[in-house]
Structures are given as C-alpha cells and as structure tokens.
C-alpha cells in the first residue's frame, strides 16, 4: 500500500515536471532562434560556404517526417534519446490518466442503484469503494482533462523537435574564426595586489 501511494504521488506530480522540462527546452530553443535572427553581416563569425552544410529547411522537414532525424543530420545524436524519452513520458502519462478516467467513469456510473447494466464495466479494484458519487464524478473529470492535455504535450514535444532541428541547422553555418578569442586571465588588483579573474575578449579587425 505504501509503494502504491508513492507511485500515485509521483504520477500526479509527473505533469508539472514534464511541463517544466518542455518549457525549459522551449525557452532555450526560443533564445537560440532570437540569436539566429539577430545575426548581422558585420558580426565576429565567418559564414561557412552554403554547400558544406545541409539546407535548414530540408533538415526541418526530416524532423517533421521522423522526429530526431534532423538532430542526427545536425550531428547532435545525443538529443534523439531526449526527444523520444519525452514522447514516451507523455504517452505513458496519457495511458495512466485514461486508465484512471475509465475506472472512475465506471465507478461513478455504478454508484447509482438503478444502474445495474454495467454499461462501463465493473468498478476496477484500484478505485476506492464506498465513496460518494460526487467524488467519483470529480475524479473522472479531473483524469479526463489530464488525459486530453497529454495530446497538447505530444504536440509541444513534436514542435520543439522540429524547431530545434531547424535552428541548429542554421547554427551549423557559423565557424568561429581566429579573429575572435576569449579567455579567462588572472591579473592582480591594482589596489589590493590580490589576484582576480577577468574574462578577456579580443577581436582583430
């Protein structure tokens, strides 16, 4: 029973954790998109020849057809397990919420004495017995809403997969030149003569 309660609490907290991961990925992707959009011709990067990297739109379409394929083309294979883990997590939670919804739907229907036809089947054993019908109805609606939201989660993961492939295909055009260097130096403070760390960026024109 204790293990069951722990599992139940974990599954109830799962949507919030999953949403946080998706939002974090979305914010990171959006930030990279903004960085790509703000690039100018006089920046400190050299643009690689266009025929040395795949066309970003083509890479994007590969991830549209098969999630993760664009990441493989972008030589970021490590992202593929992340993408499919998110898909698996959303789908697993969708299955769980649908199971709970079906159980509470049957429990709510069977809680009325006049309903003897078992229209939605027997009340599952994991549903507490003897609860008021209103409790069954409330839980039924809650799990139905959570189940429906998993579709939004699947679409979000799919969209982030496509956006990530497209954005990083653009970023592959960049090659940091020798004219831009950045390093951390330790120099003494002129007043206290104590060492302090400094980030030095050098640009050669």
Image (cartoon, grey):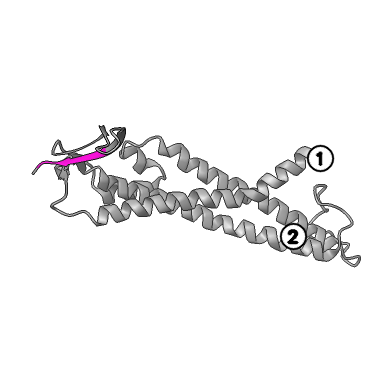
Report the span colored magenta: 199-204
Sequence-wise first label, 1 or 2: 1
Image quadrant holding the C terminus, namely: top left
The image shows residue 195, relative to residue 95, as above or below, that is: above
Count all numbered tags in the image, as a single digit. 2
C-alpha gap between disc 1 and disc 2: 20 Å
- The residue indicated by pointer 1 is 1
- Compare residues 20 and 1 and report the one nearer the observer: 20
Q: Residue at x 44, y 49 (%)?
A: 25
Residue 198 visible in the picture: yes
The overriding secondary structure of the stretch rendered in magenta is strand
Observer-side mark, 1 or 2, equals 1
Q: Residue at x 63, y 56 (%)?
A: 147
- Residue toward you, 117 or 1: 1
Quadrant where the N terminus is found in the figure: top right
**In the image, what residue occupies the spot 34% across and 43% down?**
70
Could you tell whether 186 is left or right of 12 in the image? Answer: left
Q: Quadrant of residue 191?
A: top left
Q: Is residue 202 magenta?
A: yes
* Residue 157 visible in the current orientation: no
- Is 55 placed above or below 193 here? below
Q: Secondary structure at mark 2?
A: helix
The label on residue 139 is: 2
Callout 1 crowding tier (Cα within 10 Å): few <14, some 14–19, many ≥20 = few
Q: Position of residue 151 (x, y in %)?
A: 55, 56
Q: Residues within 10 Å of mark 2 (few under 14, many from 20)?
A: some
In the rendered image of this protein, does residue 150 appear above or below residue 194? below
For mark 1, give the secondary structure: loop
């Amino acid at each position: 029973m204790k293990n069951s309660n722990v599992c139940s609490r974990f599954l109830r907290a799962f949507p919030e954790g999953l949403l946080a991961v998706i939002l974090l990925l979305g914010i990171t992707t959006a930030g990279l998109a903004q960085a790509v959009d703000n690039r100018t011709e006089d920046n400190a990067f050299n643009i690689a020849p266009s025929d040395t990297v795949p066309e970003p739109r083509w890479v994007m379409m590969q991830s549209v057809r098969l999630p993760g394929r664009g990441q493989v083309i972008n030589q970021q294979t490590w992202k593929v397990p992340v993408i499919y883990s998110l898909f698996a997590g959303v789908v697993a939670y969708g299955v769980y919420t649908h199971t709970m919804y079906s159980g509470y739907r049957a429990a709510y229907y069977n809680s009325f004495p006049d309903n003897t036809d078992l229209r939605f089947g027997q009340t599952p054993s994991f549903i507490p017995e003897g609860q008021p019908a209103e409790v069954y109805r409330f839980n039924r609606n809650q799990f139905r809403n959570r189940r429906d939201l998993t579709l939004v989660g699947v679409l979000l993961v799919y969209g982030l997969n496509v956006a990530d492939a497209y954005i990083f295909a653009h970023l592959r055009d960049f090659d940091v030149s020798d004219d831009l260097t950045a390093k951390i130096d330790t120099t003494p403070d002129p007043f206290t003569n104590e060492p302090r760390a400094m980030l030095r960026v050098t640009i050669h024109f």
